[in-house]
Image (cartoon, grey):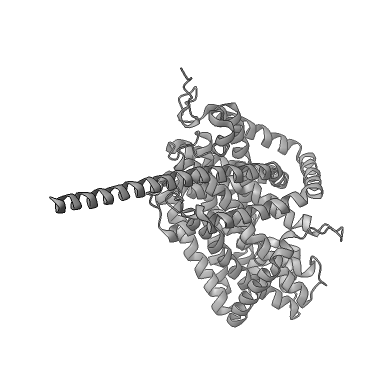
Amino acid sequence: MAKKVTRSDEKKSIFGLDVNGPVFFTSSIFIIISITLTLIFEKQAEKAFKNIQHAVAENADWFFILCINLFLVFLVYLAAGKYGKLRIGGQKAKPEFKTMSWFAMLFSAGMGIGLLFFSVAEPIKHLIKPATAEPNTIAAAQEAMNFTFLHWGFHAWAVYALVGLALSYFTYSRGLPLTIRSIFYPFLGDKIHGRIGDAIDIFAVLATLFGLATSLGFGVQQIASGLNHVFGLPDGILTQVLLIAGITLIATTSVVLGVDKGVKFLSEWNMRVAVVLLLLALILGPTLFIFRSFVENTGSYLFNFLKISTWSETYSGKSWQNDWTVFYWGWWIGWSPFVGMFIARISKGRTIREFILGVLLVPSLVTFFWMSAFGSVSIQQALSGDSTIVTAVEDNISTALFVFFQDYPFAMVINVVAVILIAGFFITSSDSGSLVVDSLTSGGKIDAPVGQRIFWAVTEGSVAAVLLIGGGLEALQTATIVTGLPFAVILLIMCYSLYKGLKEDLQKLEKKKSEKQMDDYEEVVKEIVERRNKKDQ
């Protein structure tokens, strides 16, 4: 008799909590120890992590570049081919959320806040220190937008789409728990429900929580800088901790309400505020220039797509790419457990083609227009001789967006809208992240008890606050990026696993169709014979 396997989402801890004990308690203990050691040995930890990051970037840059391109090609193949018609959750499954709500949630969780932080700063950085062109020239300006689009466009979303698609497929189509371990089922079988699976999920929990905590910490620094710039409020540690407390409180409320009433509601409002900010920048700024730059930037990016996406500074021997492109690839991959799991959580009922095109195209095109509205305009100002925005980026990158708007009509109002939007994106990142961590630590339960969601939402905020007070955010952020290397290998395995699973399901679907066609044919033949027999009688 075969031994009964207890699935990860069926396990109970020794304290009766609705969690997977080994993952929940091991992750919690490791988080406490890691934070303590990082605070005690802040400088040593930061130095060690940076050395590791440098070693990874210097030796594995080609691997990151190869992987990120393979992920994109693989997804295009799935969307364009015969597998695109398969539906997540079975052919009769229906989407849980409306398309616009779905777009709003995946965009808010994916990189909404990054667009606010880097939309002005990154193009300016590339203008004054370009990859190959002469600094502060038209060639440098175009190159700056090409690489900005590369870092925030199709490749970034391909990483999220791959993880989201694989997890949603194995969860809703194969009935496995919503955890990273599930993607290894074709290789490990029921062993994913044992210690190996626990180790995989612990790794994902730590990467997710530290990534969220560091991003929350840095984001709060930007909000504080904005409040200081606009209202003259102090932007010290006290203000930042109070902001974290406020954001955590709202995020916790959202988590308690759940995805439909909490996360969905906030994500939709974020997108409305983002549209308002974009329209203000468009109407009050150089409107025609923004549209022209969007068209030209997109065309230039697509024309140079293969060149810049495979460029690796092979012959120049410089480190520009390691500082930017490889950094981003490691960051997106390191963040993929969080964003991918959240996208998976909200994507049941979508076809493979709808999912891939939706996750790849829509956010990327919105991002391109956003970057053109802020980045191209900033570059134009710099090329015209106005060094205000350049000075702001070099002095304090977190204030760049607010300095960008200071000469616009209604600058005060616009900057208030920007602060609200930054806070909103961080709240949605925090609450969606809490849901993901809770799913991982509960063995893959989609709707875990409210108390556990509250615990992880509060933990996120607490970790960020402690690290802000004691230092150590940068060390942990660097560590999060370093995790991108081993996770890139996991993503390659994920590609094969997903392909194998989709192939099996397509064969079953085609077999059923063939059998149905045969049954229909036999029924038609039977009817014809019966009619002839009646005629002959």
Q: Point out residue 348 in the picture as x, y percentages from the top left corner.
A: 44, 49
The image shows residue 271, relative to residue 428, as above or below, that is below
In this view, the residue in front, 528 or 371, is 528
Q: Residue at x 61, y 77 (%)?
A: 290
Residue found at the very far front of the displayed protein: 536
Residue 234 appears in the picture as rendered: no
Q: Point out residue 413 in the picture as x, y percentages from the top left corner.
A: 53, 71
Residue found at the very far top of the displayed protein: 1
Q: Point out residue 220 in the picture as x, y percentages from the top left corner.
A: 61, 54
Residue 138 appears in the picture as rendered: yes
Residue found at the very far left of the displayed protein: 537
In the displayed structure image, the side of residue 321 where residue 33 appears, left or right = left
In this view, the residue in front, 453 or 311, is 311
The image shows residue 452, relative to residue 320, as above or below, that is above
Q: Residue at x 68, y 42 (%)?
A: 489
The number of numbered badges drawn on the structure is 0
Q: Point out residue 381 in the picture as x, y percentages from the top left corner.
A: 70, 77
In this view, the residue in front, 373 or 98, is 98
In this view, the residue in front, 333 or 427, is 333
Q: Residue at x 59, y 26 (%)?
A: 195
Q: Residue at x 60, y 39 (%)?
A: 204
The image shows residue 278, relative to residue 396, as above or below, that is below
